[in-house]
Image: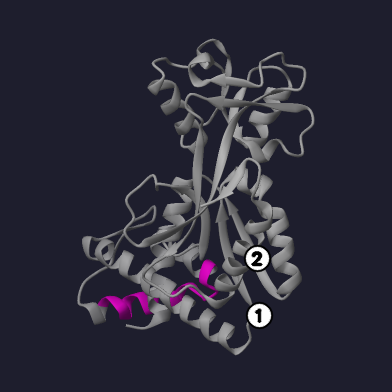
Amino acid sequence: MQIHQLSYFVAVARTKHFTRAAEMTGVSQPTLSKQIRVLENNLGTPLFVRGRTGVELTSAGEALLPHAQRILIDVESAQRTVHEVANLRRGRVRLGATPSLCDGLLPEALTRFHRTYPAIDLEVQEAGSRVLTRELAQGRLDVALLIVPLPTDEPDIETTPVLREHLVLASPATSDLPERMSVAELRDVPLVMFREGYDLRDVTLRACARAGFEPRLAVEGGEMSAVLRFVQAGLGHAVVPSMVLATRPQLRATQLIDPPLDRVIALAHRSSETLPLAAQAFKSELLEHLTVFAGGDLELV
């Protein structure tokens, strides 16, 4: 069983088509088909059922797929680690972060890291904690800043809480809402609600449920930038991290009390493998940055 054969196998499994898989992997279709046959012969069983409209995995192929994906991820990780050991000034950090962190915390942290390690490439994926947890578990991210506790049980993910951020009610700057409100008082406040799967949606709905009511939704389904624009337009109010309002003078914050709302941000990576050196360097720079960034509505954990 050869690495390139597993790569061809995974490509066919993803595309369900030999020709498209050959284009994806940069080889000719006959070469790819031959290597798949060799792999099947070595394993003693077909991996695909070939039909007129494409191909499907056999039960043996379905059993092989997660192992093949893991092997390819580990090979890439090993190659990247060797390159980084040779010269830390070369490498890549694949970072995931929630939208509020991309908006408030990350720009300065990334700028600081890039000044120190200008030759290390940065890849940033912006998504909710559920998606980031899955991407980490599947080896498509090196490290992620997400909300804990994790939304799904992933024993392979190690988390280190680093920061607690306080949540506030965002309103237009002209709003006459008081500076402080209890969560129960949100009963009569029209809310702009994030889409399904968004961490802040879950936090807001749980807080309202604990206070004994279902919130009145004026608009729902948006991402962070859209939600803030809807609030600014006067369509309603939204529960957001205080940090996202720091550079938006068109919006104002109302502190939520009884109980106060907050959430814990953690730095996460796969516990089954050593964090790549470039990612270790980013983690160190980030933690140093947080000591300066924290304060006011943010506190170190």
The residue pinned by badge 2 equals: 122
Residue 178, image x, y percentages: 66, 16
User: Hey, what amino acid is under mark 2?
Assistant: Leu
Magenta-highlighted residues: 24-40
Furthest residue toward top: 188
Q: CA distance from mark 2 to mark 1?
A: 11 Å
Residue that appears at 52% across and 81% down: 81
Circle 1: residue type = Arg
> In which quadrant of the rendered view does residue 1 lie?
bottom left
Location of residue 200 with respect to 298 vertically, above or below: above
Is 20 located above or below residue 225 in the figure?
below
Q: How many marks?
A: 2
In this picture, residue 62 sits left or right of residue 4: left
In-image side of 6 versus 229 (left or right): left
**Residue lying at 57% horizontally and 13% vertically, measured from the top left:** 189
Mark 2 and mark 1 lie on one chain; the one further toward the N terminus is: 1
Label 2 sits on a secondary structure element that is strand
Asked whether residue 201 appears in the rendered view, the answer is: yes
Residue 90: numbered disc? 1
List x then y, in percent, for residue 146: 50, 50
Crowding around mark 1 (Cα neighbors within 10 Å: few <14, some 14 to 19, many 20+) is some
Q: Is residue 273 magenta?
A: no
Q: Secondary structure at mark 1?
A: loop
Relative depth, front residue between 260 and 267:
260
Q: Residue at x 73, y 39 (%)?
A: 246
Please tell me whether residue 202 is drawn above or below residue 272 in the rendered image: above
Q: Position of residue 82 (x, y in %)?
A: 53, 86
Would you call the spot at circle 2 few (<14 residues within 10 Å), some (14-19), or many (20 or more)?
some
Q: Residue at x 71, y 17 (%)?
A: 234
Q: Is residue 216 visible?
A: no
User: Is residue 37 located in the magenta-colored stretch of the structure?
Assistant: yes
